[in-house]
Amino acid sequence: MTLERPFDFLNGAMNKTVLVRMKDERELRGTLRAFDVHMNIVMDDTEELENDKVLKKIGSVLLRGDNIVFISP
Amino acid sequence: MTLERPFDFLNGAMNKTVLVRMKDERELRGTLRAFDVHMNIVMDDTEELENDKVLKKIGSVLLRGDNIVFISP
Amino acid sequence: MTLERPFDFLNGAMNKTVLVRMKDERELRGTLRAFDVHMNIVMDDTEELENDKVLKKIGSVLLRGDNIVFISP
Amino acid sequence: MTLERPFDFLNGAMNKTVLVRMKDERELRGTLRAFDVHMNIVMDDTEELENDKVLKKIGSVLLRGDNIVFISP
Amino acid sequence: MTLERPFDFLNGAMNKTVLVRMKDERELRGTLRAFDVHMNIVMDDTEELENDKVLKKIGSVLLRGDNIVFISP
Amino acid sequence: MTLERPFDFLNGAMNKTVLVRMKDERELRGTLRAFDVHMNIVMDDTEELENDKVLKKIGSVLLRGDNIVFISP
Amino acid sequence: MTLERPFDFLNGAMNKTVLVRMKDERELRGTLRAFDVHMNIVMDDTEELENDKVLKKIGSVLLRGDNIVFISP
């Protein structure tokens, strides 16, 4: 992967499935639809996971960036 | 859903019911009436939920954005 | 309720009784007298509540905005 | 009380005794001598209280604003 | 090592393996691909470690800078 | 004491012994040598205290301002 | 020691051994090589200490400033 800046990573992940590790240890997995400089992101078809198991289907979400540990494709 | 930026998500949710996951694990469900760039939001007919059960009806609220994990329609 | 921005909510609540949910789970109830863009607020005739019971009467207060979860009329 | 902005509250409290509720649940009571826009304040003749009892006399203090929950006359 | 500013350290570590200590005590080890002034970083071939043992392989990640304690080559 | 702004308090305390209450409940006592607008301070001959007892002598320190509750002469 | 501002302290400590107390109570000891206005620092030959005992040798590190309580020579 070649990229200039971390946010290029999010451009490359648009409309693909990403996994978001949250500060409360849970994870959200969904299709990335939008992001901004605060790392606020919008995902569709989002599921909430704990220990790799689906806890709940939550559909579309706007996730506030300050809750994020990392985002992985 | 096509949108340019995360806050377009909130524009699309105006005057509709949204669910707000809070950092203290509780949830607020109400009708979105206003928001700003800090993700401060105003909702009407708001209920406070815990584990999907209604704890309390709290009517109109101004919710401070830094308490939010995610907002979902 | 129609409003353009969240802080219009506070303009509409001036000189009326509001309930403030705090991050430490307590609540303050008083008459809203002033606010600023940081959500710092001044209330008169303020009572501190826990589980809907009055703990203490504390009169006038300047409340620092970063302690607030939500404000409700 | 009529005031335009929350910090007018502090102007009105200058050289009077104020009670400061802290985020660690303790309280400081002293004579307000100075404040700034970060809500940093200077008090003289300050006492530290816990559950309304005086724990310690600490004289003059510069208190960093981000520790404050509320200030009350 | 001679460098003018801390971020020169990251320039020198580009495309090399780095270990990232996180505020939740875990560690991520991967190949540094990008960073910005907020210390947001992108790594490839990332592994999550606890007590020096590999917990999970997580591939490419965008790690939010405010979770970082330190980065070490 | 008459002063215009909280930081005048620190000007008046230069080269004198001050006690710094920290957010982790410990205290540092030393001779104030420098400060800035973030309340970062430098002290010489610093001792670390817990419950008014000296835990450790730590000499000169640069203390990061966001750890401070209050500073007292 | 005479200095104008806290960061002069770090200029004086360049290429010398410093001890860094962290918010998680651990300490890092190493040779200071670089710093910036956020108090991000780079150290070489760094050791991690707990209760004055060496836990681990970690070599060169870029330490994020918001983890720091104090820095001492």
Image (tube, coloured by chain):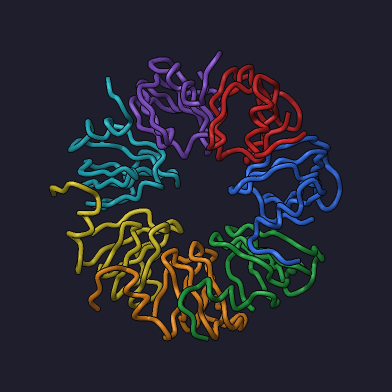
Chain colours: A cyan, B yellow, C orange, D green, E purple, F blue, G red
Q: Residue at x 55, y 73 (%)?
A: C62
Residue G56 place in picture, x, y as percent? 65, 22
Residue G9 place in picture, x, y as percent? 68, 33
Residue A22 place in picture, x, y as percent? 40, 44
Q: Is residue A33 above or below residue C39?
A: above
Q: Residue at x 73, y 71 (%)?
A: D30
The quadrant in which the N terminus of chain A is found is top left
Residue G32 place in picture, x, y as percent? 63, 23
Q: Residue at x 30, y 61 (%)?
A: B36
**Can see residue G56?**
no
The quadrant in which the C terminus of chain A is found is top left
Residue G36, picture quadrant? top right
> Left or right: where does residue F50 sit relative to residue A7?
right
- C6, F51: nearer the viewer: C6
Q: Is residue D6 above or below residue F44?
A: below
Q: In the rendered picture of this protein, how many numbered marks are placed on residues? A: 0
Q: Is residue D13 above or below residue A67?
A: below
- A16, B53: nearer the viewer: A16
Which residue of the protein is positioned furthest toward the left in this rendering? B2
Q: Is residue C60 above or below residue C65?
A: below
Q: Residue at x 42, y 36 (%)?
A: E38
**Can see residue E12?**
yes
> Left or right: where does residue F59 sit relative to residue D14?
right
> Left or right: where does residue E5 sit relative to residue G21?
left
Residue F2, picture quadrant? bottom right
Residue B17, picture quadrant? bottom left
